[in-house]
Image (cartoon, rainbow, N blue to C red):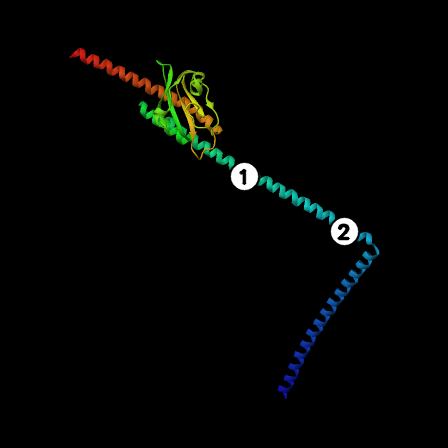
Amino acid sequence: MSKERGGVFGRGEEFLKLFSKGAEFTKELMQENERLRRSLVQLEMQHSSAAQNPDDWEKLRHELAERIENLQAERDHALERLREVESENHHFAERYIEIEEENNALANLYVASFQLHSTLDLSEVLKIILEIVINLVGAEVFAIYVVDEKANRLEAVASEGAPLRSFPRVALGSGVIGSSVASGDTFCGDSRGPEDAEAPIACIPLRVQEQSIGAIAIYKLLQQKERFTPLDHELFTLLAGHAATAVFSSRLYANSERKLNTIQGFIDLLTK
């Protein structure tokens, strides 16, 4: 009997719990329904107010259109600024490459100038000058001239791209080469002009203390080099000074060696 009553009471408690949960759920549904009803009433009131005041809709539409226009203007301004920044970055990248090339060229020139002054052998000096003009200036056909003071003319002593005999002797003050050497001014013409031994596209006079000792005459550039650059003109100035000093020193040394050998030979004859 007690078991039966316990079972009845147990089922009663479960029923009460289920009833309580159902009541709570029903209460929540009623609260949610009330909230939705109030929201619906509020929306109906807003709709009714807007319907009665069409100016409010027109004002809102105008504000939205103005806001959209402002946003579009801001977007266009941002895009324009982005294009400007990209252009600046491109310019900076190009300038960085140019500076790197200039630094490399100057570093190479420093090494080349060191090599120029590391020997007093004229043939070695001329060979180094040829390498500098090829690698740093980008010349394909050119010649190195020296002044023959007795004949008062210029003679080619080294060349690249054409046989040495194909470069003519030039009188001082005559033609592009002679005039450039006589005046001491570098000549730089059309880098893509016709190849002509009488009319080089560039001529760099070699001078030591205002004394003309020779010139570098360029007749043709390498295929990948389209024109002379501002850096080339700086290289011309630096190269002219270093090459002139190297050639002058090596010729002076060669002359002194010849004289020394002559004197030594004369002394040997006297002492025999």
The quadrant of the picture occupied by the C terminus is: top left
Identity of the residue drawn at 80% across and 52% down: 56
Identity of the residue drawn at 65% across and 84% down: 8
| Residue occupying the far top of the picture | 270
The residue type indicated by label 1 comes to His
| Residue occupying the far right of the picture | 52
x then y, percent, for residue 223:
43, 34
Q: Is residue 78 above or below residue 121?
A: below
Identity of the residue drawn at 71% across and 73% down: 23
The quadrant of the picture occupied by the N terminus is: bottom right
Q: Which residue is mark 1?
A: 90
Element type at mark 2:
helix
Q: Give the class, few, some or many, for how many residues have Cα within 10 Å of label 2's Cα (few <14, many ≥20).
A: few
Q: Which residue is mark 2?
A: 61
Identity of the residue drawn at 39% across and 27% down: 142
Q: Is residue 245 above or below residue 139?
A: above
x then y, percent, for residue 76:
65, 44
Quarter of the view holding residue 158: top left
The answer to whether marks 1 and 2 mark residues whose Cβ atoms lie closer than 8 Å is no
Q: Give the class, few, some or many, for how many residues have Cα within 10 Å of label 1's Cα (few <14, many ≥20).
A: few
x then y, percent, for residue 131:
37, 29
Element type at mark 1:
helix
